[in-house]
Amino acid sequence: MLYGARPAEAAFSSGWVSGFTMNAFDHSKTDALFQFSHISHSTQEHLKKVYSSLAICMCLAAVGSYVYIYLVACLVRVSAASPLAVLGLLICLSTERKRLAFLEGFALLTGFSLGPILDDVIAVDPNVIATAFVGTSVIFICFTLYDTHRGHLFLRGTLMSGCSILFLVSLTNVFFGSTLLFEANTYLGLLVMCGFVLFDTQLIIEKAENGDEDYIWHCVTLFDDFISIFRRLMLILYTKEKPIPHCRGLRIWDRPKPRVTCPQTLLLSWR
């Protein structure tokens, strides 16, 4: 009984506290997120291959970005078409070993093509990269776990409409250069890509349940979703930061001239 309280009040207070404590330490709802008994064993094994390949792609993309920034940025410029060319070969090949090799090459070149973007961010605040990566990982994991228990295939039409709107807004903003349209496009793009994580995860599960075991192509789908979210989240954080005087310039170790990139111009270059 609480000191100085009437019996009825004390009973209510103790009951409320005990109930709150039980709810606070009731992990049944949390544990349910990590239970996949509703998914067949073969699909679970397929998802393990997909996410293992995705983890490898992340590491290779990080290596590619590091190589661009610190080793060969002044000697080699890889266009955005390079990862697309490797992706085309990945589609055409049928041998699993060759497709895995091209998947690794695709991830490496994707990271390499992110080099100019990361270089611009480092010129403002290097901490933005780590923050964007952690935020992207949290978003990706949360939406993936949420999706395994609910159907979201109905989002296809909405997401396609969102992509059309993003394209039209981007095209319009090329001529007007509106900051409002720029911010709306960035945040809407982030929302649409989060929706694609929900949709693509559910689609991969449904395909695996129906016998589609092409884990390499499924990995490419999720890898593209992750990179797209990472780009937009990093852009949002980038535009919120003020340039640090000692970090302005072309290179992190040699910055003879201050440089600040216009966000609208940067958004076009990031696409």
Image (cartoon, grey):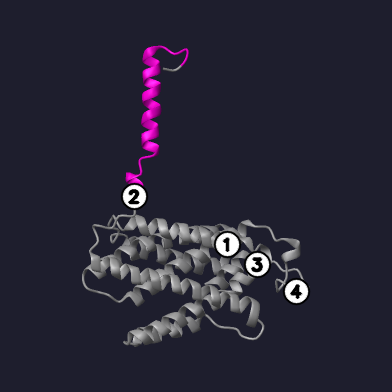
At 28% across and 65% down in the image, what residue appears?
44
At 38% across and 73% down in the image, what residue appears?
219
Mark 1: amino acid: Ala
Front residue of 154/118: it is: 118
Q: Which numbered circle lies on residue 31? A: 2
Percent of width and height locating residue 262: 65, 66
Mark 2: amino acid: Asp
Q: CA distance from mark 4 to mark 3?
A: 12 Å
Foreground disc of the pair 2, 4: 2
Mark 2 crowd level (few <14, some 14–19, many ≥20, 10 Å Cα): few
Asked if the residue at tag 1 contacts the one at tag 2, i.e. Cβ–Cβ closer than 8 Å, the answer is no
Which residue is label 1 attached to? 130
Q: CA distance from mark 3 to mark 2?
A: 39 Å
Badge 3 marks a residue whose secondary structure is: helix
At 73% across and 72% down in the image, what residue appears?
253
Which residue is label 3 attached to? 122
What span is in magenta?
A: 3-30
First reached walking from the N terminus: tag 2 or tag 4: 2
Mark 3: amino acid: Ile
Q: CA distance from mark 2 to mark 1?
A: 28 Å
- Left or right of residue 236, residue 243 in this image: right
At 21% across and 70% down in the image, what residue appears?
210
Q: CA distance from mark 2 to mark 4?
A: 50 Å
Badge 2 marks a residue whose secondary structure is: helix
Percent of width and height locating residue 155: 32, 60
